[in-house]
Image (cartoon, helix red, strand yellow):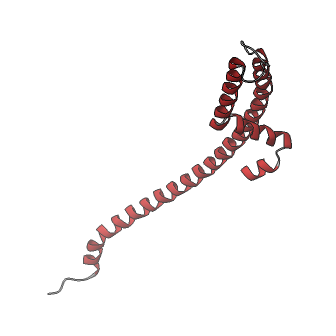
Amino acid sequence: MNELFNERMTSGQRAADRLAGVVGSWGFIIIQSLILAVWAVLNVTAWVRHWDPYPFILMNLFLSLQAAYTAPVIMMSQNRQAAKDRIEAHNDFLVNQKAEEEVRAILEHLAAQDAALVHLHEQMQKLPEQIAKAVPPKC
């Protein structure tokens, strides 16, 4: 089912999943934190020309743009995953229904076997009496 679902994904859905996977990783957080730290250090120490002096308005603009585009893409990925989860849940429900029917049939069969065993046990208990009646005692 997963393969079928993945085959039907559009390129936009694949891109959304890839972006959500990258942005939702420790690697992304670490690299972004390093870039922001370098940005701040370079602008505070003036080793390079101050292109974004404190309070780093340009950096805030870039972060806002990143958030404005990243959040909807992540939401698209989550919506697609939720649709996939609903399909899997429905499939699991159908499998569980079938399993329940099979278990019920097995239990009915076991109950029939129990009844047959009880009947055979009763017949075996009566067997000595029947043998005694059928065979005359030896003198």
Asked whether 59 or 67 is in front, the reply is 59
Q: Quadrant of residue 54?
A: top right
Q: List x then y, in percent, for residue 12.
A: 85, 39
Asked whether 125 or 114 is in front, the reply is 114
**How many dots with numbers?**
0
Q: Residue furthest right?
A: 11
Task: Name the residue rendered at 75%, 26% in the picture.
Answer: 71
Q: Quadrant of residue 60?
A: top right
Residue 139 lies, with reference to residue 60, above or below; the image says below
Q: For this view, does 118 lie left or right of residue 35?
A: left
Q: Quadrant of residue 125?
A: bottom left
Q: Is residue 65 visible?
A: yes
Q: Is residue 1 visible?
A: no
Residue 35 lies, with reference to residue 93, above or below; the image says above
Residue 12 lies, with reference to residue 49, above or below; the image says below
Task: Name the residue rendered at 69%, 44% in the picture.
Answer: 88
Task: Name the residue rendered at 46%, 56% in the picture.
Answer: 111
Q: List x then y, in percent, for residue 17.
A: 75, 39
Asked whether 74 or 136 is in front, the reply is 74
Task: Name the residue rendered at 51%, 55% in the picture.
Answer: 108
Q: For this view, does 86 lie left or right of residue 120?
A: right
Asked whether 125 or 71 is in front, the reply is 71
**Quadrant for the C terminus in the image:** bottom left
Q: Residue furthest bottom?
A: 139
Q: For this view, does 21 lie left or right of residue 73?
A: left
Q: Residue furthest left?
A: 139
Q: Residue furthest top?
A: 55
